[in-house]
Image (tube, grey):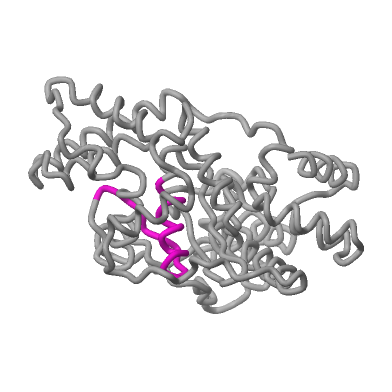
Amino acid sequence: MIRRFPDLPAWEAGTKQPTLKQLEKFAQATHLPVGYLFLLEPPDETIPIPDFRTIGDIALGHAGPDLLDTIYQCQQRQEWYRDYARLHREPPVPFVGTFAVGSDVVGAAARMREMLEFSPDQRGNSWSDALRRLVDEADRNGVLVMVSGIVGSNTHRRLDPDEFRGFAITDDLAPLIFVNGADTKAAQIFTLAHELAHIWIGESAVSDVDMASTPANVTERWCNQVAAEFLVPGSAIRNLRLDRNHLTGELESLARRFKVSTLVVLRRLFDADYFTASEYRSVFSAELSRIRRVMEDRGGGTGGNFYNTQPVRVSKRFARALIVSTLEGQTLHRDAFQMLGLKKVSTFNELAARLGGA
C-alpha cells in the first residue's frame, strides 16, 4: 500500500492532506466507500452470520472487506434462489437441521456419507476428482455450493485462506456453502465437509476449520469431528500399522487413499491413539512446516477455463436456475449478469449452452 500511496504516513500524521482524486484512488484500492474516509471513527461492520474464527483460543472479531463482500454476494444469490424455489414450489431440503450438536459423531458422518455417496472408494483418482464429486453431490441434494478464490469475478481481489476458509448460511429452501478456493484442494474438501455438517445442524457460521488445535466452541468442535469422521472413518484406520521411520510416506499414502490432507490424516491417527498429545503437537508442527515449503516451491496456479470455473464460483444449481429464469423473461438480464459476474450477452449465451448440456 505504501508503494502505491507513498504519502500515506504523512496523511495519517496530519502533516499532509490528500487531494480528492487521491482519496478516491485510496478508497478504490481499499474497497471502501469514499465517505468512510471522512468519518471521525471507522464504522463497525459486523459479519451478518455467527463468526467462529479464532487464532488459538482468541476470537478474531474483525472481518476485512473481501470476506464481507463475499458474504453479501452470497446472501444476494441465496435470497434470489429462495424466491425462485418458492415460485417453482420446490420442496424443502430434507436434511437441513436434522442433526443436533453433541449427537453421535460416527452415526452422523455415516448418514452424510451415505446420502452424498462419498465413501473412500467413490472419490476418484485425485483430490480434484474428490472435490468435484462432493460439490456435485451436495448440489444434487439441494445445497448451493460456491467455490472461489476471488471476490466475485475480480481477479485482483484474491481471498486469503488465513482470514477464512469457508462459511455456511442455512435455509430450508436454499442452504448455501462458500468454500475459499484459494486454499489447497485437500483443505477445500475438509472445509466443505465441515460446512455440510453446519447445514445438517441448521446453524450458519463463518467457520474455524483449523486442524492444528481443538476449537473451544462446542459447535465448531463437533463439526470438525464429523467432517474428519466423514472423510476418514475411524473404522478404516483403527488397525493400521505405521512405519514411524518413514512417517511422511505413510501419511502421504493415507492422504491419497482418502483424498484429504496429511494434516487430517495426522488428526485422525491422534484420535485413534497412535500418538500422545505431545507427540501429535510435535509431528503436526513438523508436517505443517513441510507442507508450507512444498506449497512455496509449487507457486500459484492458473485460473483455468472461465466456462468451467464460473459455474463453480456461483454454484451450478444457482447458475442453471438463474439462466432459465432470465431466458423465460422472469429475471432481467442486467440482474442476471450482476449475480453471475458477467458483462457480455455472448458470454451469457455460451454459459447457458454449456450448462444446458452439462
Tell which of 67 and 115 is nearer to you: 115
281 sits to left or right of 164:
left
Q: Position of residue 87 (x, y in %)?
A: 77, 73
Q: Where is residue 175 shown, x and y percent of the image?
A: 56, 65
| Residue situated in front as seen by the camera: 254 or 114 | 114
Picture quadrant where residue 215 is located: bottom left
Magenta span: 190-212
Q: Residue at x 29, y 44 (%)?
A: 233
Task: Please indicate whether residue 60 sits to the left or right of residue 16 in the image.
Answer: left
User: Does 293 appear above or below 324?
Assistant: above
Task: In the displayed orientation, state which residue is furthest to the bottom.
Answer: 40
Of residue 324 and residue 236, the one placed in the foreground of this image is: 236
Residue 52 horizontal/vertical position (percent):
37, 66
Q: Using the image as rendered, state which of residue 225 and residue 104 is in the foreground.
A: 104
Quadrant in the rendering for residue 173 = bottom right
Which residue shows up at 74% across the image and 38% down it? 307
* Image-based side of 71 in relation to 357, left or right: left
Which of the image's four quarters has the C terminus? Answer: top right
Q: Residue at x 70, y 66 (%)?
A: 81
Q: Tell me if residue 122 comes above or below residue 168 in the rendering.
A: above
- Residue 249 belongs to the span the image colors magenta: no
**How many numbered marks, from 0 up?**
0
- Asked if residue 204 is among those painted magenta in the image, a careful observer would answer yes
Q: Position of residue 350 (x, y in %)?
A: 84, 40
Q: Give left or right: position of 240 versus 260.
A: left
